[in-house]
Amino acid sequence: MSVLEAFHQMLAQRMDHINEHILNNIEDYQRLNDECDGIFAVIIALLEEGTITEIGKLLIEYEDKKLEVQALVETVMYEQGVKDGCELKKILS
């Protein structure tokens, strides 16, 4: 495994830990997630009552892509935070 692959694996593990132990304990985060899940469940239920239309398929694809975008944003932000922390340590030393 390369150093970059190991770094990305460490980031994924750290972000999972933060999600599991920190974010899930933040009331607003949990509430907003629950509201989003509820709204999306209603949309899916309405679409499944009839034939899923092309718009419904696009809506599902849109949601999947938005989740991918959010995951990418979180990863990039965390990576930058690690880099910034290392740079700050150099400055303060």
Image: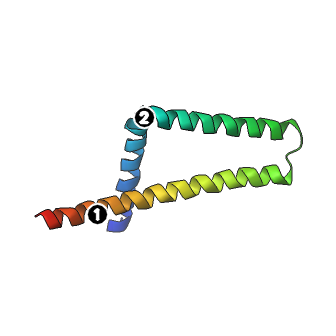
Q: Would you call the spot at circle 1 few (<14 residues within 10 Å), some (14-19), or many (20 or more)?
A: few
Report the disc number at residue 59.
none
Q: Quadrant of residue 51?
A: top right
Q: Quadrant of residue 46?
A: top right
- Alpha carbons under labels 1 and 2: distance apart: 25 Å
- Decide if residue 55 is in sight here: yes
Q: Would you call the spot at circle 2 few (<14 residues within 10 Å), some (14-19), or many (20 or more)?
A: few
Residue 80 in the image, given as x and y percentages of width and height: 35, 63
With 36 as the anchor, is 89 left or right in this view?
A: left
Q: Quadrant of residue 2?
A: bottom left
Residue at the image position 33 percent from the left and 59 percent from the top: 81
Q: Which residue is mark 2?
A: 26
Q: Give above or below for 56 relative to 3.
A: above
Front residue of this view, candidates 9 and 22? 22
Residue at the image position 61 percent from the left and 55 percent from the top: 66
Front residue of this view, candidates 11 and 9? 11
Q: Residue furthest front?
A: 28
With 8 as the anchor, is 62 left or right in this view?
A: right
Residue 10 in the image, given as x and y percentages of width and height: 35, 54
Residue 86 in the image, given as x and y percentages of width and height: 23, 63
Report the disc number at residue 84.
1
- Decide if residue 2 is in sight here: no
SS type, badge 2: loop
SS type, badge 1: helix
> Which one is earlier in the sequence, the residue at label 1 or at label 2?
2
